[in-house]
Amino acid sequence: MSADTIAIIILLGSFLLMIVLRFPIAYAVGISSILCFLYRGIPITTVCQQMVKGINSFSLMAVPFFITMGVLMGTGGISEKLIALANTCVGWMTGGMAMVNIVASYFFGGISGSAAADTSSLGSILIPMMVEQGYDDDFSTAVTITSSCEGLLVPPSHNMVIYAMAAGGVSVGSLFLAGYIPGAILAITLMVGSFIISKKRHYPKGDKFSFVALLKQLLKSFWALAAVIIVVVGVVGGAFTATESAAIAVIYSLIVSVFIYRGLTWKGVWKALEKCVDTLALVLILISTSCAFGYCLTTLHVPDLAAKAIIGITDNRIVIMLLINLILLFLGCIMDMSPIILIATPILLPIATRMGIDPVQFGIIMVLNCGIGLLTPPVGAVLFIGSAVGKVKMERVVKATIPFYLCMIITLLLITFIPEICMLLPNLFMK
């Protein structure tokens, strides 16, 4: 057995062992990297150098700004206005509140970019509201957690910025544009699933559609939705970079939340910033340790070995892409989203590009796979948050979510095998 093979076993074996033992993911990644470095006789200072190199990036500064923007807007009274807007759009349908939940998540996702924030913010309002109107509590929770994944696809999403960095220079603007149609398709498939279940269970309809009411709610929600326009149009139009647009969006979010909607006091702003620091600390530790882990993978030629192993099974493009999706879904069951993106991208992206998949399309495929992973036991963070917010046992939530898993898998297969779904807008506006 060669020295490189033993190093790979030490790196991946110790990492998987620590995951099973429920180590915090950042520690598991960092310690396994150190063990690999020690075996190969590389100075430990190299670990520190790689960690610092990983977070010493101007483009990475967009991540804390987008997180701050999402927290400020999420706690600034935006949720209620977006729910009211969604209600005027789709509340008249059978299972109207389920449809409102899904559409509100699409709107809110364009502000928060976080499935966890969506579930905790919208779920705390909509789940009790749905239960009061006669919806089952497990169904209400299932709709909330699955629709929250729209926020991962709809820009601005800080996970797309992390993917762009891990992929080595993929255009953030292209990724932002690529997420709109997949996010809409996910919303439509979830609405179809909700409609079928609502018909069978005789869930109620809402008030009749009114164009005047829709126009009023659009005017009330304009300041919230304008944040998305500032970010996306600014980046796509080349007016400023993703980092600059994120910084502008933070200032804009502060003004809207404090002075226009007045849902946030200055004391609340400081609490929101404390929450941002907590979240950012976790994200940056993960990014830094993952860069050291990625350095080990690269120097040991793990991406090439993985590519040869997968292509050695079959050269059929469809089978290979299905295998990649299965790998990502499995990783989603045992790991959180950011480390999957940081660790799996250097390994799987070269295989996908060999199969003719554009890096932008693969980014959307990876983000949706990771989003599904947030809803699957044993470590699905959004599943736990939804269970806590809805006060429903996790086992019941998982059972109620099964039909929606199917909706999400259908969307995943569509974006995997129909490139135009992801690439239409980037090709239209970025070339």
Image (cartoon, grey):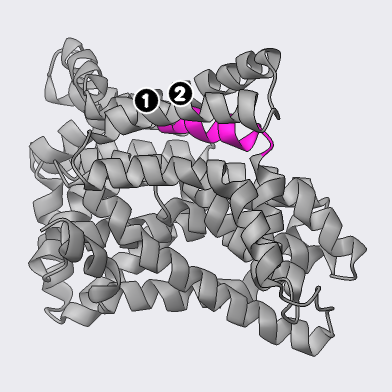
Question: Which residue is pictured at 85% across the width and 54% down the height?
Answer: 128
Residue 158 appearing in the image? yes
Q: Is residue 64 left or right of residue 178?
A: right
Circle 1 SS class: helix
Question: Which residue is pictured at 36% across the width and 77% down the height?
Answer: 413
Relative to 55, does residue 266 appear above or below in the rendering?
above
Circle 2 SS class: helix
Residue that lies at the very extreme toward the front in this rendered image: 212
- Residue matched to label 2: 251
Question: Which residue is pictured at 19% across the width and 51% down the height?
Answer: 347
**Three-letter code for the amino acid on which mark 2 is drawn:** Ile
The spot of residue 33 in percent (x, y) is 27, 28
Question: Which residue is pictured at 65% across the width and 17% down the height?
Answer: 271
Relative to 41, does residue 283 appear above or below in the rendering?
below
- Alpha carbon separation for disc pair 1 and 2: 7 Å
Q: Let me know if residue 72 is in the magenta part.
A: yes
Relative to 12, does residue 76 appear above or below in the rendering?
above
Q: Quadrant of residue 376?
A: bottom right
Tell me if label 1 and label 2 are in contact, CB under 8 Å. Answer: yes
The spot of residue 198 in percent (x, y) is 76, 82
Query: Start and end of the magenta stretch?
Result: 66-77
Which labelled disc corresponds to residue 382?
A: none
